[in-house]
């Protein structure tokens, strides 16, 4: 399979971009024609951003796994599809060819089918980074079940929320997950979550770590045994479900500025076509590339750029079970050398933490296989960019700074490796098919350059979210109502004299902590569950490694029943239990009052200034009900 739509020069980029704007239907039809369809679409795009309603290739039919796997069996059956590097470098790795992937996915799909899982059912997947996670995702897609992968760092409560919201009928999980020195008891967290969930009929268990688990005779299925039996008995069902282009492929929960996480829904065809198109162009795919995306499949980066994008393109994708700093800070570099990785795609937070480890872990590392480096998930600071360029890329590898979101499915703004220019800290230019604009707070279009604005997109690309699961109104409110007629990203951006975009960060109440997206409201709700807490306000502050840290201002009962340190610890435990350990506040300051307007609204702007240490620059406080609280909070700053 070749990809004639790979852009080869800056000139070609300019003409592809122009065509994508002037003749979007012709542009995307040509790209769609290079995929495998059960039924070729005759329609291209119907849309409005008011309802909103977006449909791409509506009457086409396909199965994404036939594009990821079956299509490659003709010419690359024996090529490695997935390299799996275990957490413990001493454990044996695994290499799964496209042929083997076909068997594994179809075998797991058969087990799911045998237990009554069918097209349209929601299946939650809560696993560590093991090959069986990839098989599970693809097995769901094979039979048309809608997968909802839950990152392994989420708590039982968060799992329960997601299962309930999706009305999932099955969960696929592991006994435990190895991450660095830890063995995380995934199955027991699922058991705890299921106490509150009535929709789940089956729990499929893959045994990875050997940690003891409680088995529920009614619901639990030993996945490994059943797969083995099916493979040995020879009754694998190889048929893939023919899916309509607009059928949902998956749900992925993500945080917003209000309330509980929302289930972003992606469609089958549009998602496949766009993520693959972006993969091929941004990373300048070559058929023999070894692609190492260090994300977790629990986040959208893992969905699109460990699994679907690379597999559709037919490269070898590397899945790593562990963490960058275990057993030491040289782990990524060992992996790069061990497998001769060509493309390394990671988060600025990982780069900063490895930068902090100094150059010692880089000693005797070759890294000469690397051709392209990428970053994703948060703004990259200039220092980290140069460190990555000099120490890892040896100034020979283009760095792509890819901006996108769970909601966008694939990369929307990025340079194309070696084809379009890079500029440190800039995501630079939009991909063909993507029409970003900046608007001011009144929603007016900003046409000039060298300005900041709110980043919106004014035309649909194929992998735009279709809805938020079970609540279309919420999708409309969140993304399409702030600036009617536009998709609002929630990000602020600066556009330079060349039209390059630099993402400056969220302008809503969403935090980005180590590349993890967390709503301030979610953290506040969790903190407020502590019995001594009366009220709280959470803001982000600049953090050297995490990008943003979490700063919580907390009002407690006058008569504290516990010591201060105990309260802090209990708040940490509460947040870990309600959301997950990664959402624990870095700083907790007890305060007597919060800066509120007369109408009772918390002035977060002031708290953000205090949290970042700009004590003399908190701005106007005259509209506050009690300006005195600001002085008190400033004094107590940690
Ligand atoms: C938010 C989306 C996209 C996969 C990972 C995160 C921030 C993402 C960049 C970048 C600056 C970035 C934005 C965005 N973000 N990529 N290259 N430069 N900021 O997905 O969890 O949906 O988070 O991450 O603020 O809105 P997500």
Image (tube, rainbow, N blue to C red):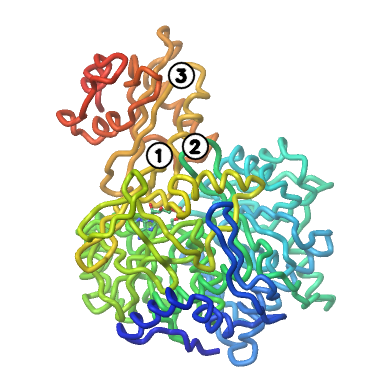
The Cα atoms of the two marked residues, 3 and 2, are separated by 20 Å
Q: Secondary structure at mark 3?
A: strand
Residue at 21% across, 18% down: 631
Residue identifier under label 3: 533
Give the image location of residue 339, x and y in percent: 43, 78
* Nearer to the camera, 313 or 25: 25
In the image, 113: left or right of 360?
Answer: right
Mark 2 lies on residue: 258
The residue most toward the left is: 616
Report if the CB atoms under discs 3 and 1 are less than 8 Å apart: no
Which image quadrant for residue 149? bottom right
Binning the other alpha carbons within 10 Å of mark 1 as few (below 14), some (14 to 19) or many (20 upward) gives some
Q: Earlier in the sequence, mark 3 or mark 2?
A: 2
Please indicate, yes or no, whether residue 340 appears anywhere in the rendered image: no
- Alpha carbons under labels 3 and 1: distance apart: 21 Å
Please report contact status of discs 2 and 1: CB closer than 8 Å, yes or no: yes
**Which residue lies at the image location 35% right of the left edge and 35% below the top edge?**
539
Q: Earlier in the sequence, mark 2 or mark 1?
A: 2
Q: Residue at x 76, y 46 (%)?
A: 200
Q: Residue 20, position in %: x, y?
A: 44, 76
Provide the residue designation for mark 1: 509
Mark 1 residue element: loop
């Amino acid at each position: 399979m070749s990809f004639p739509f790979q852009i080869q020069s800056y000139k070609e980029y300019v003409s592809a971009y122009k065509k994508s704007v002037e003749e979007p239907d012709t542009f995307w039809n040509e790209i769609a024609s290079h995929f495998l369809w059960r039924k070729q679409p005759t329609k291209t795009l119907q849309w409005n951003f008011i309802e909103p309603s977006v449909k791409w290739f509506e009457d086409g039919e396909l199965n994404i796994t036939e594009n990821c796997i079956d299509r490659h069996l003709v010419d690359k059956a024996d090529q490695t599809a997935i390299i799996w590097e275990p957490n413990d470098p001493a454990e044996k790795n695994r290499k799964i060819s496209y042929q083997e992937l076909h068997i594994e996915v179809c075998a797991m799909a058969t087990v799911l089918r045998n237990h009554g899982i069918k097209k349209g059912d929601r299946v939650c997947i809560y696993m560590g980074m093991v090959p069986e996670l990839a098989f599970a995702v693809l097995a769901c897609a094979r039979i048309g079940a809608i997968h909802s992968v839950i990152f392994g760092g989420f708590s039982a409560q968060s799992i329960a929320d997601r299962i309930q919201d999706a009305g999932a009928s099955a969960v696929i999980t592991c006994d435990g997950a190895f991450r660095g020195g830890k063995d995380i008891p995934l199955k027991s967290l699922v058991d705890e979550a299921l106490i509150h969930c009535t929709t789940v009929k089956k729990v499929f268990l893959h045994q990875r770590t050997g940690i003891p688990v409680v088995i529920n005779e009614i619901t639990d299925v030993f996945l490994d045994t059943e797969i083995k039996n099916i493979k040995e008995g020879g009754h694998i069902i190889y048929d893939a479900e023919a899916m309509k282009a607009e059928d949902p492929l998956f749900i992925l929960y993500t945080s917003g500025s209000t309330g509980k996480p929302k289930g972003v829904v992606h469609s089958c065809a549009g998602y496949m076509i766009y993520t693959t198109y972006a993969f091929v162009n941004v990373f300048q795919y070559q058929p023999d590339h070894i692609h190492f995306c260090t994300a977790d499949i629990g986040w959208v980066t893992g969905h699109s750029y460990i699994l679907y994008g690379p597999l559709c393109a037919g490269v070898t994708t590397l899945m790593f079970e562990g963490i960058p700093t275990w057993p030491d800070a040289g782990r990524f570099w060992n992996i790069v050398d061990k497998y001769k990785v060509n493309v390394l795609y990671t988060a600025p937070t990982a780069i900063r933490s490895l930068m902090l480890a100094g150059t010692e872990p880089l000693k005797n590392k070759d890294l000469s296989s690397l051709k392209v480096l990428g970053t994703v998930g948060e703004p990259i600071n200039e220092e980290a960019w140069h460190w990555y360029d000099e120490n890892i890329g040896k100034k020979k590898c283009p760095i792509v700074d890819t901006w996108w979101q769970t909601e966008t499915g694939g990369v929307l703004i990025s340079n194309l490796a070696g084809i379009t220019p890079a500029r440190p800290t800039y995501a630079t230019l939009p991909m063909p098919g993507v029409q970003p604009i900046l608007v001011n707070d009144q929603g007016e279009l900003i046409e000039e350059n060298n300005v900041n604005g709110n980043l919106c997109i004014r035309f649909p690309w194929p992998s735009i979210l279709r809805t938020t699961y079970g609540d279309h109104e919420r999708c409309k409110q969140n993304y399409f109502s702030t600036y009617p007629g536009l998709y609002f990203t929630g990000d602020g951006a600066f556009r330079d004299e060349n039209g390059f975009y630099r993402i400056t960060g969220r302008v809503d109440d969403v935090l980005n902590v180590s590349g993890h997206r967390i709503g301030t409201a979610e953290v506040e709700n969790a903190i407020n569950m502590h019995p001594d807490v009366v009220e709280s306000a959470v803001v982000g502050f600049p953090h050297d490694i995490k990008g943003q840290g979490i700063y919580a201002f907390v009002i407690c009962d006058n008569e504290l029943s516990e010591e201060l340190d105990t309260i802090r610890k209990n708040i940490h435990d509460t947040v870990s239990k309600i959301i997950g350990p990664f959402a624990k506040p870095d700083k907790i300051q007890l305060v007597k009052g919060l800066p509120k307007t007369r109408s009772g609204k918390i002035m977060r702007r002031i708290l953000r200034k205090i949290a970042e240490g700009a004590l003399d620059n908190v701005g106007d406080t005259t509209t506050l009900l009690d300006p005195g609280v600001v002085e008190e909070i400033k004094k107590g700053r940690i």
